[in-house]
Structure formats: structure tokens, C-alpha cells
Amino acid sequence: MSHPWGCMRLMKRGGWATDEHLLRQHSKNSVIRTSVLRKMGVGAKTIVDRTAGGPWQRILPGLVLLHNGPPTWTQRVTAAVMYGGGEAMLTGRAGLALHGYSTSAHHSQTMLLIPHGSHRKDTSFVSVERTWRLPGAVRKSGLSVAPLDRCLLDAARRTVDEKACTALIAEVVQRGDADVVSLLTELNEGCGRGSAVPRRVLRDLGAGAHSVAELEAQKLYARSGLPPMVHNWNVYADDGKLIGCFDNWLDPVGFVWEIDSFEHHSSPAAYEKTMTRRASAQGYGLVVVSHTPRAIRTQPEVVIADLQRAYQLALQRPRPNVRAVDPGQMSHLAS
């Protein structure tokens, strides 16, 4: 609220009914405090009448929404921050959505971080966490939001399904907005409640998986009896040309295992690109086998048999003259 109380123009008795502009001026995204309405001259009985089946509604304790339709997502998170008080900030899924992860906007619960000494309780769609480790807030769409890594881990600690937790964390890591080591450090320093699942997920992602599908593939491969593979390594021809970065690579025999996720083949152009890259790899003598995430989940024994046959085929020819490099080691050396 940018209007000092000393400059606030009081409404004439009943004037609020025709002074919609003034109401909007003193609200944020159409959310206004009841205390502000009172200081503007709106009587307590009037507030009750207009929020009890009238044109307004109470969205959270002490807060009124200046219409009676369903609140928008923006109005809900605005009300949550106003409810939390001056040092409150959004975190969890709501915070992720404001950091640009739009899928998190579909979650109904809004999580707030508040200082440990504050006295706010969970109410309606707002979940409150009091903390001694209140981070510096950033501003997103005019609202106070925790840093991205804190939002992510607060959301992950409340995600009990391991696949859902993996998808949540992997999306942020894949975009390059956070890294596994920093996330593990933050997780270890923060609240231990609910940390077991994200800790397992981060350790798995640290082993090279970039998605739920890749993680499931690695777990299945461990049952195959084949030598260990490395994950997401760059493979170069002897002239230094990049052949590709492959999901799974068995270096001693030049064997590639790719996971054909739908997101990478959801258009004809994407499918053609994958087929071209695969043909190029085979042209350099690599043995390439691929499976869909669905096959890995529903036909694990068939997938294992395919892998074992492909490995035997790779053993029967000389290893191609290629070089595999861990991109993580390359970036470390470059820095």
C-alpha cells in the first residue's frame, strides 16, 4: 500500500458504492485489508453485508477480495503474502510458479515462509512455515518470493511421491537454474522434516540422471548384469567432431542406450532429428539401442534381454575409434 494514512481520502457515507477507483487504488490485485477499508470510512457492518453474499468476499482473515467470483491464482498468492505480514515471502510451488515454472501454478496450496517469531497459522489455502533461516526475498510480479533453490526444496519436501519429486527437481536442474551440489548443501542446512525423498532424488540425479525416465532406466540397467554405464557424456569422433551426448554410454565397447521420451519426439521434426543423430552414431560404428519409458516400466525383462544382446553384438566387433568425455569435467576444467 503506497498511500500514507495521512493522505487517504475518507469516503463519504455510502460513497464507497460509487468510488470503485479509490477502492482499487488502495488494494493490490483487488485484495484489500479490512483495516484499510475501515480507515477509508467503510463501516464494519457494511463490510459484513458486502462479504456475506454481496459483491465482495473474505478471501483470508483480515482480507477482502473486491468481487464475489472465484479468486484468480494471482489474487490468491497476493492475499497469502498480505496475510503473512511484512517479512513473509512465497515459497514452494507458488514461488516456483513466480520464478517461471508455470506447471507449479496448478497446485492449490500456497506456502509462505515467515520469521520464527511471527504468529501466523495455516488457514484456508495457505500453509505457513516459521523459520530461523529466512532468506533474502526477491521480487516477482510485485510479490516477495524466496530464492529459487529454497522454493524448489520447500516444494520437494512436501512431495512424498518419489517420481513426482524427481520430475520437480530434474526440471530445474535441466534448465541450469540450480545444481545438485548446491541443492544438497541447502537441504542439509535446512529443515530436516520431509527431506528424505528429495535427498534420495538429489543423490540419484547426482549420479547422472536428468529425468524420471533416465532414473528408472538406470535402476533397471543395474539388474542386467552388464558393466556400469556412464550417463549424458559427449562422444567425439577421432577428428574431434561431436557425435552426440548420449543418455547412457558403455565406453569399453562403444555401446549407446537411449531413452526415447515423448517430450523429445513430440513433433515430426524432433523425431527426424533423433533418427538422424542415431544414424550418424551408427555410422561411426557405435552400437545403439533405444527404449521408451513405457517399455522400461511395463516390459523390463524384454528391455534387459535387448540390452544383453546389444552388448554381445558390441563385443563382437573392434571398439570404434571414438572418445567419450564427461561434460561436467569439461566445464570444471574450463572454469
Image (tube, helix red, strand yellow):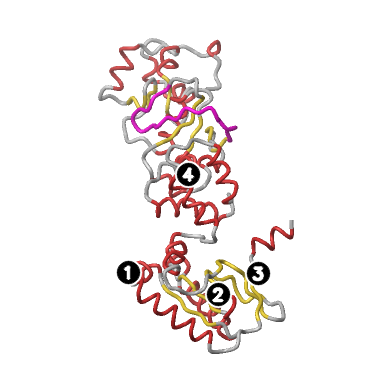
- Which is closer to the viewer, label 4 or label 1? 1
Whether residue 322 is situated above or below residue 335 in the rendered picture: below
- Which is closer to the viewer, label 3 or label 4? 3
- Which is closer to the viewer, label 4 or label 2? 2
The residue nearer to you, when weighing 187 against 262, is 187
| Residues rendered magenta in the picture | 120-138
Q: CA distance from mark 2 to mark 1?
A: 24 Å
Q: Secondary structure at mark 4?
A: helix
The answer to which of marks 3 and 1 sits earlier in the sequence is 1
Q: CA distance from mark 3 to mark 4?
A: 35 Å
Image location (x, y in percent) of residue 160? 38, 46
Whether residue 8 is situated above or below residue 268 in the rendered picture: above
Q: Quadrant of the C terminus?
A: bottom right
Task: Identify the residue under disc 3.
Answer: 325
Task: Tell me, for residue 97, which label it has, or none.
Answer: 4
Whether residue 98 is situated above or below residue 52 in the rendered picture: below
For the point 44% across and 78% down, the residue is 307
Magenta portion: prevailing SS class: loop
Task: Tell me, for residue 298, which label it has, or none.
Answer: 1
Q: CA distance from mark 4 to mark 1?
A: 33 Å
The answer to which of marks 3 and 4 sits earlier in the sequence is 4
For the point 47% across and 29% down, the residue is 81
Q: Secondary structure at mark 3?
A: strand
